[in-house]
């Protein structure tokens, strides 16, 4: 019989990766566990960003159309010829590996505090009690990546901080270009690009240690990103899965290619023309896996209200106005971001309004 632990679990990869008996907190319910047919590959459009910016209007419109179709269906597509230096991608992955290979004690010098987004989290022990993810994460502000790393980890980590700052800057430039494609696809020109020009985004490194019973657990549970647009770089290990047409599919890593997906906040900003989509990450018994994630977030106090041209009789307002500050707080203090975040958030805003609590759309 399993013994009841009163203390929160300690997620130490060096111990857990060798353990054949998985602690109950990390065992997911049967309905959520990965099955073998979830490794079928998802067919996604591969968008060539250099071609989009080549100056040929016809090509740009054709590419925008492909992006629009993918975003209206499930919100996922792949991006190549993106202009981000391959050496930078390799160095960011390599130094991230170095960070996660340090001892738990060393990593906890930058420990994420309750209610905060940034810092190192070893699984979500202490934050949640069950369905814990088989992962460690390091989250930092993209606008002050180097400063954050040096302030928390000290001068020895300056190089890592510098690489993460360069990576964040590259993602910031890239996401504005992606927003141009998205803007063209919805006929709103540079509206999205301008809206996010002063974005305040999150960088997160995910580290999934190997697990001797990978079919009992999940690296990241099923969820929709609550954020705006996500740029994901996977190392060479497979693990990302997306739920499309009632079935889980795999999106395997391809060299020098990013996976882009729409999050709940952007779904709201497009008045639900574009969808966010459920996804998760599975783990495996032989190799640790890493992913580097850029979560686009608007400046905290900006009101998310779709451009007028996306609202009409056929498409009435799908969500009320809100600020990212409110939605971020919701995911940290009131709700564990999952498959229902956007709907529960919209109801929560409505309830607060009825109870006389001021929200941004008064
Ligand atoms: C606002 C946020 C909530 C999460 C961290 C940032 C950006 C994305 C969110 C998250 C990664 C989406 C998946 C579920 C989550 C709980 C996770 O597994 O990490 C989310 C983040 C979080 O609350 O920590
Ligand atoms: O690691 C992955 O492939 C997916 C991670 C993810 O979905 C997330 O961090 O939101
Ligand atoms: Fe995600």
Image (cartoon, rainbow, N blue to C red):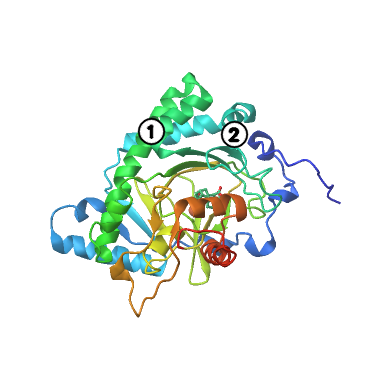
Coordinates of residue 350 in the picture (x, y in percent):
54, 67
- Name the one closer to the observer, 317 or 73: 317
Of pointers 2 and 1, the one earlier in the residue sequence: 2
- Kind of element beneath mark 2: loop
Query: Residue 74, labelled with which disc?
Result: none
| Residue ranking furthest to the right | 1
Q: Where's residue 109, x and y in %? A: 59, 28
Residue identifier under label 2:
111
Say which residue label 1 marks: 165
The reply to whether residue 239 is visible in this rendering is: no
- State whether residue 1 is above or below residue 156: below
Residue 69 sits in which quadrant? bottom left
**How many marks on residues?**
2
Residue 180 shows up from this direction? yes
Q: Position of residue 21 (x, y in %)?
A: 75, 46
Question: Residue lying furthest bottom in this view?
Answer: 313
Counting from the top left corner in percent of width and height, residue 252 is at: 44, 53
Name the residue located 47 percent from the left edge and 30 percent from the top edge.
148
Q: Which element carries disc 1, helix, strand or loop? A: helix
Q: Residue at x 29, y 65 (%)?
A: 66
Looking at the image, residue 319 lies above or below residue 239: below
Asked if marks 2 and 1 touch (Cβ < 8 Å), the reply is no
Q: Quadrant of residue 126?
A: top right
* Residue 137 or residue 319, whichever sits in front: 319
């Amino acid at each position: 019989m399993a013994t009841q632990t009163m203390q929160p679990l300690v997620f130490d990869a060096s111990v857990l990766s060798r353990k054949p008996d998985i602690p109950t907190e990390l065992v997911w319910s049967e309905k959520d566990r990965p099955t073998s047919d979830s490794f079928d590959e998802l067919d996604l459009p591969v968008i060539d960003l250099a071609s989009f910016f080549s100056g040929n209007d016809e090509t740009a419109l054709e590419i925008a159309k492909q992006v629009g179709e993918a975003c209206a269906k499930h919100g996922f597509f792949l991006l190549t010829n993106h202009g981000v230096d391959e050496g930078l991608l390799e160095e960011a992955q390599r130094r991230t590996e170095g960070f996660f290979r340090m001892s738990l004690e060393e990593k906890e010098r930058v420990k994420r505090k309750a209610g905060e987004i940034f810092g190192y989290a070893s699984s979500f022990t202490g934050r949640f009690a069950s369905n814990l993810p088989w992962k460690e994460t390091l989250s930092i502000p993209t606008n002050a990546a180097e400063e954050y790393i040096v302030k928390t980890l000290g001068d020895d980590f300056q190089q890592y901080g510098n690489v993460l700052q360069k990576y964040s800057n590259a993602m910031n430039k890239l996401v504005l270009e992606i927003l141009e494609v998205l803007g063209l696809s919805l006929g709103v020109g540079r509206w999205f690009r301008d809206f996010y020009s002063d974005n305040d985004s999150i960088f997160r490194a995910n580290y999934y240690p190997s697990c001797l019973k990978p079919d009992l657990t999940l690296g990241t549970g099923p969820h929709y990103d609550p954020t705006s647009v996500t740029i994901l770089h996977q190392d060479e290990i497979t693990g990302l899965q997306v739920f499309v047409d009632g079935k889980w599919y795999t999106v395997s890593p391809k060299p020098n290619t990013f996976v882009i997906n729409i999050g709940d906040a952007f779904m709201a900003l497009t008045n639900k023309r574009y969808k966010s989509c459920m996804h998760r990450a599975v783990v495996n018994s032989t190799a640790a896996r890493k992913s580097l994630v850029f979560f686009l977030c608007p400046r905290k106090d900006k009101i998310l209200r779709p451009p007028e041209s996306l609202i009409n009789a056929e498409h009435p307002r799908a969500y009320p106005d809100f600020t990212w500050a409110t939605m971020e707080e919701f995911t940290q203090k009131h709700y564990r971001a999952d498959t229902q975040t956007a709907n529960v958030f919209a109801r929560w805003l409505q309830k607060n309004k009825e109870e006389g609590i001021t929200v941004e759309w008064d």
